[in-house]
Image (tube, rainbow, N blue to C red):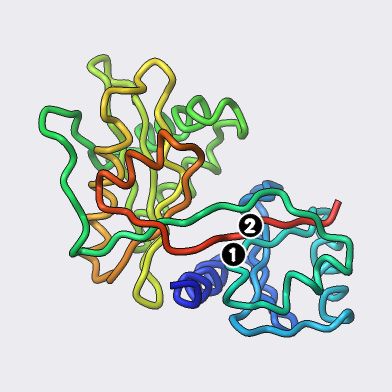
Amino acid sequence: MDTPVQNFAVANLRRRPVVVETAGFVAGFDPDTTSPYINYATPLPGAEPTTADVAALVGEFRARGLKPRLEFAPVAAPAVEPALRTAGFITEEEHVYLVCTPGTLTAPAPGGPAADLPRTDDEYAVLDAALCDAFDGQFAPSPEGAARLRRTQERGGAVRLVRTPDGGCAGGGSCSPPAVGTSELAGVGTRPAHRGQGVAAAVVASLTEAMFGAGAGSVWLEYSGDGSRRVYERLGYRPAGNRLYISLP
């Protein structure tokens, strides 16, 4: 599954507002944010970059005042990690990714909350704020963040939220539009006050079903802890490989 996931990473970055392709790499940039989680690069499967290739990639980030950063499945491009290490890149994180197929997808336990599609700009803004809260303020809610969520839905991906009785948002998440037969489910978060109530399970199941309905043969995701992994595995996600996050200080 490493090569399909890496091919997806390439295709997904090519959807960014600004795309730069250097020898063996694709970098995607969004001028609306300096977030390293949105502005990053990935190698083409099988890439064998030279020292000059890595330097050219670093230059694209430096020219924009951004940290040089990559996300990729190392097994799909074995020569890339050594070349980046030689240039001084260091590991941020390494995650196991999980994959779900139509044959493994399992419905969440009955009686849980319902995940719905945001309908208005206000609902996208409320979801953006809820995700900020869910991820301990790692990013600030913003009109740009809400607009990115809406674009994801409008361009063939999926966005879901779980509403609270008072009209607020308990949590939500999104799934990138399918490419090369698969889709990435990302950014699933639940506000602290609503954890343990089935919010994440409802969101993940709804997003996954939406992508299968859109023609994806698989959906993959990364998890941030054993608790979330158990949620995903109960819904039919299974370990399939590793992804590396690496950057140049």
Q: Residue at x 74, y 69 (%)?
A: 81
The N terminus lies in quadrant: bottom left
Residue 30: mark in rendering? 2
Query: Label 2: how many residues lie within 10 Å, few (<14), some (14-19) or many (20+)?
Result: some
Location of mark 1 (residue): 17
**In this rendering, position of residue 7 left or right of residue 75:** left
Q: Residue at x 29, y 40 (%)?
A: 203
Depth order, front residue of 72/156: 72
Residue 22 rendering spot, x and y as whole percentages = 74, 80
* Identity, as a three-letter code, of the amino acid under mark 1: Pro
Q: Dot 1, how many residues are within 10 Å of its Cα: few (below 14), some (14-19), or many (20+)?
A: few
Left/right placement of residue 79 relative to residue 94 reads right
Distance between the alpha carbons at the discs numbered 2 and 1: 6 Å
State which quadrant residue 108 falls in: top left
Front residue of 233/215: it is: 233
- Left or right? Give the position of 78 relative to 136: right
- Asked if disc 2 and disc 1 are in contact, CB closer than 8 Å, the reply is yes
User: What SS does tag 1 mark?
Assistant: loop
Percent of width and height locating residue 237: 32, 54
